[in-house]
Amino acid sequence: MKKTLLLLSLLVAFTACVTNDDKPPFNEPDPPNYEYTQEEKDAEILRIEEYIKQF
């Protein structure tokens, strides 16, 4: 009886650790897009310069 219980517990322990490698572990988000147009850069520079003048 003890051998059967030991064998059953080992079987459960080893089969519980098996993973399914067909699908990824999680969905990775797309990397953020940090590319700006020249117009966006110019507008940001103007905004910063105006803030500096005010304060």
Image (tube, rainbow, N blue to C red):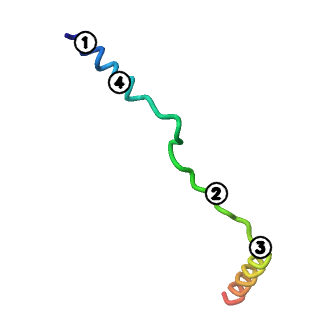
Q: Residue at x 50, y 42 (%)?
A: 25
Is the Cβ of the residue at disc 1 closer than 8 Å to that at disc 3? Answer: no
Identify residue for label 2.
31
Residue 33 sits above or below residue 8 on the image: below
Identity of the amino acid at label 1?
A: Thr
Quarter of the picture holding the C terminus: bottom right
Query: In whole angstroms, how far apart are the C-alphas of marks 4 and 2?
Result: 38 Å
Query: In whole angstroms, how far apart are the C-alphas of marks 2 and 3?
Result: 18 Å
Is the Cβ of the residue at disc 4 closer than 8 Å to that at disc 1? Answer: no
Q: Residues within 10 Å of mark 2 (few under 14, many from 20)?
A: few
Q: Residues within 10 Å of mark 4 (few under 14, many from 20)?
A: few
Q: Position of residue 41 (x, y in %)?
A: 76, 76
Identify residue for label 4.
13
Query: In whole angstroms, how far apart are the C-alphas of marks 4 and 3?
Result: 56 Å
Residue 29 falls in which quadrant of the image? bottom right
Q: Which mark is residue 4?
A: 1
Identify residue for label 3.
37
Of callouts 4 and 3, the N-terminal one:
4
Residue 40 sits above or below residue 24 on the image: below
